[in-house]
Each structure stands twice: as structure tokens, then as C-alpha cells.
Image (spheres, grey):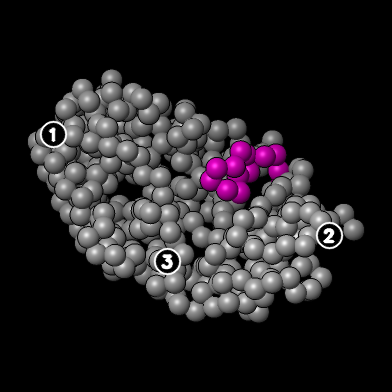
């Protein structure tokens, strides 16, 4: 199987830089680039020391992924470079992750990483190496449009990563290539096996890269101990129901872990009051949101006059909505919309843009 790097029919004399994470996806991108006839260079960014991040020496760390990337490059016979971006990653992603929890927000560190070290610093490195493009293993499609490159969902909806790439700028998109966006995962693994890549059967990462055991609370507590300060759990009227063990354990829409009883119906986290260190809970109907106000909007272009859909969580299905340039107005009440998350707008499969959710309007209030 071949991949279209959108550099013309003959890639002889072309140079492609591939972002190699050590996983099967980016390894296959490197293999496809090498097989295309272009000069291929692999770059791996060392972003964190996992043992330090979770306070457990000897645990699985980024070093293994670097070794896997280097082994793939050796198998393909391509150049491979490792750059230390640990300090930049800690400041722009890990510290921001902890600060968001401290502020009662629900962070998306993968978007912050793409905004920063991956699609800013890595693009700069690729340009300095004289590359014609930077290719990654993301499952999205780059489509040539009349006004420039467009970002579209992957063909396989189960693998689509467009939600995490909404902050990609137009100039970045013009330079980026995503050769896996039209492939199912099974084909990607088959290519890896066919080319003898040692990562062909390597499991996919299921968690945030610097929290591979899923215990994000321990990472936040280590970086921001104050996020573990106990406080009150109250209902929507301010009545004290119990005590929590730190805001870092809660997100909007959560039901488990409240450890309070006596309510005639299940209670959910409705919002987090960081200033008062309070968790406000209520019935599920109180989670219904009619609007979300966005900040730091990134717009890739496209017509907002036609039918639009919006995703407010990475695993959520896109739902019909309208957009007025600042507010997303849902066609029907949406549940679990949390400040700190992103709202990404689509016209069909095309990503129009998105922004960060700052505040929401409860459906009950809008109807009053």
C-alpha cells in the first residue's frame, strides 16, 4: 500500500521529516515515506521522564519509546535524531495540566502539546532541516481545497483524532501531512508487519502520555499539593452534603467518588468552585447546557451558514449546533460540558475550527 504525501507524482529529490513517537502509527508513516523514494528523516522529541513525573523510579518511561523509534529508523535505513524538549513540555503541557485542575477546569493536554512542542517547535526543526513537509501518524485527512489545505475527519471514525488538532493553524496545515487518515488501523499494522518493523504489535497508548497508569491525581498532587486540599460538597442551593478530598479528583459530569448519601436521586458534579474549594452537585438534569462561550478561537475557514455539528469531548458524538463567532448554541441540551475542554466545529467531515470552553449556560436558566 502506498500513501499520498501530496508532494507531486515523483518524490525523488524530496525530503520528508517524520515525527516518530516510537509507536506503530508514526513508524508506518516513516516506512511509507522511505518507500516513496523521498529522503526521509525521523525526529523524536524527548518530552518527559516518566519515572520523575509519577515519582516512581524504574517505571516505564519515554526512553523505551525513543529506543523503539531508533530501532525502526535503523530497520528502514533512515536518519534519526532525538531532541530534548523536556523543559518546554513540562512548562507548556504538564504544568498547565496541573494548573487547570487547580482552577477547577478539565484539561486536554494532548491539544496543548500539539499547539506547542509538536506543531510549533517540531515544524521549526523540520523547516531547518530543509524538509518539504512534516508527516505525522495522526488519524486525520488533509484535503486540498480551493482556498488552501483543509482538515477533515479520518475515514475510520473510531480512530479519528481531528478533535485534538482543532488548534492547528492554516500555515501549519499547509506544511503538515497525515498519510494514515484514509486507512483503517488493521492496514497500518499489516504494513508494519510486512516491512519487519518491531513495533508492529506494540499496543496503542490508552492514556495521557505522561500519566500512562491513568493516575493523573498523583501527578497533579505532586506538582500542586494544594489541589489535594479538602473542601465542601454542596448542593445547588449551597446546602452542605459532605467533604471532598481535593478538587483534583473531580470533573464536571462525574458521579462516582462523591461518597455522599441521603439523596432521593443520583447526584453528579455540576461545577467546581475553585475559589471556594467547593464541589457543587445536583441531579443529572442540572448538567444540561444550552450554550457554551468559547475563548482563543482558532478558525480554519469554511461556511458557517449551513448545517454545523460540534464535539465538546473527544469521545462524544458531534451534535447539531449553531455558532455566532463566540458562542456555541446547541440544538438540544448537551450534558457534561466542562470549562477547560474544547468545542470543535464541523461542516460534514471538515473541521472549521474551535475554541476552549470558558463558561456554559444551563438549559434550565435559558428556559426560565
Compared across the picture, whether 365 is left or right of 295 comes to right
Q: Earlier in the sequence, mark 2 or mark 3?
A: 3
Compared across the picture, whether 16 is left or right of 265 comes to left
- Asked if the magenta segment contains residue 314, the reply would be yes
Which residue position holds label 3? 218
Location of residue 66 in the rendering, given as x and y in whole percent from the top left corner:
20, 50
Q: Quadrant of residue 187?
A: top left
Q: Earlier in the sequence, mark 3 or mark 1?
A: 1
- Asked if the magenta segment contains residue 219, the reply would be no
Quadrant in which the N terminus appears: top left
Q: CA distance from mark 2 to mark 3?
A: 36 Å
Which-is-in-front pick, marks 3 and 1?
3
Which residue position holds label 1? 76
Which residue position holds label 2? 365
Q: Is residue 290 visible?
A: no
Residue at the (39%, 72%) spot, across then down: 222
In this view, the residue in front, 6 or 289, is 289
In this view, the residue in front, 75 or 125, is 75
Q: CA distance from mark 1 to mark 2?
A: 60 Å
Residue at the (27%, 46%) spot, across then down: 21
Q: Quadrant of residue 88?
A: bottom left
- Magenta stretch in the rendered image: 310-322
Mark 1 burial class by Cα count in 10 Å: few <14, some 14-19, many 20+: some
Q: Identify whether 237 is placed above or below 269.
A: below
Residue at the (36%, 32%) spot, across then down: 180
Q: Is residue 178 visible?
A: yes
Mark 3 burial class by Cα count in 10 Å: few <14, some 14-19, many 20+: some
Give the farthest residue toward the top.
Answer: 1
Amino acid at each position: 500500500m502506498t500513501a499520498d504525501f501530496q508532494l507531486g507524482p515523483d518524490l525523488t529529490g524530496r525530503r520528508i521529516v517524520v515525527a516518530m513517537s516510537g509507536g506503530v502509527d508514526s513508524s508506518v508513516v516513516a516506512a511509507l515515506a522511505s518507500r516513496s523514494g523521498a529522503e526521509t528523516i525521523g525526529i523524536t522529541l524527548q518530552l518527559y521522564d516518566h519515572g520523575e513525573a509519577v515519582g516512581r523510579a524504574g517505571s516505564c518511561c519515554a526512553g523505551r519509546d525513543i529506543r523503539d523509534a531508533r530501532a525502526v529508523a535503523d530497520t528502514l535505513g533512515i536518519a534519526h535524531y532525538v531532541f530534548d524538549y523536556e523543559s518546554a513540555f513540562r512548562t507548556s503541557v504538564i504544568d498547565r495540566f496541573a494548573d487547570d485542575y487547580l482552577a477547577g477546569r478539565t484539561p486536554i493536554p494532548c491539544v496543548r502539546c500539539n499547539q506547542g512542542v509538536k506543531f510549533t517547535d517540531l515544524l521549526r526543526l523540520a523547516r531547518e532541516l530543509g524538509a518539504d513537509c512534516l508527516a505525522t501518524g495522526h488519524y486525520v485527512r488533509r484535503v486540498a481545497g480551493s482556498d488552501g489545505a483543509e482538515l477533515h475527519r479520518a475515514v475510520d471514525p473510531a480512530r479519528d483524532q481531528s478533535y485534538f488538532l482543532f488548534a492547528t493553524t492554516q500555515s501549519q496545515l499547509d506544511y503538515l501531512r497525515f498519510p494514515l487518515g484514509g486507512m483503517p488501523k488493521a492496514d497500518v499494522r499489516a504494513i508494519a508487519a510486512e516491512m519487519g518493523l518491531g513495533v508492529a504489535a506494540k499496543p496503542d497508548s490508552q492514556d495521557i502520555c505522561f500519566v500512562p497508569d491513568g493516575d493523573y491525581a498523583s501527578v497533579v498532587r505532586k506538582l500542586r499539593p494544594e489541589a489535594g486540599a479538602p473542601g465542601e460538597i454542596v448542593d445547588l442551593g449551597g446546602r452542605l452534603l459532605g467533604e471532598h478530598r481535593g478538587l483534583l479528583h473531580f470533573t464536571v459530569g462525574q458521579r462516582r467518588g462523591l461518597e455522599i448519601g441521603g439523596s432521593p436521586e443520583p447526584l453528579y458534579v455540576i461545577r467546581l468552585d475553585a475559589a471556594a474549594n467547593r464541589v457543587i452537585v445536583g441531579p443529572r438534569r442540572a448538567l444540561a447546557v444550552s450554550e457554551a462561550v468559547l475563548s482563543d478561537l482558532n478558525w480554519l475557514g469554511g461556511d458557517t451558514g449551513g448545517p454545523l455539528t460540534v464535539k465538546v469531548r473527544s469521545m462524544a458524538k458531534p451534535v447539531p449546533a449553531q455558532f455566532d463567532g463566540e458562542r456555541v448554541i446547541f440544538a438540544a441540551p448537551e450534558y457534561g460540558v466542562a470549562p477547560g475542554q474544547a468545542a470543535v466545529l464541523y461542516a460534514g467531515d471538515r473541521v472549521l475550527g474551535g475554541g476552549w470552553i470558558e463558561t456554559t449556560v444551563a438549559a434550565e436558566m435559558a428556559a426560565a
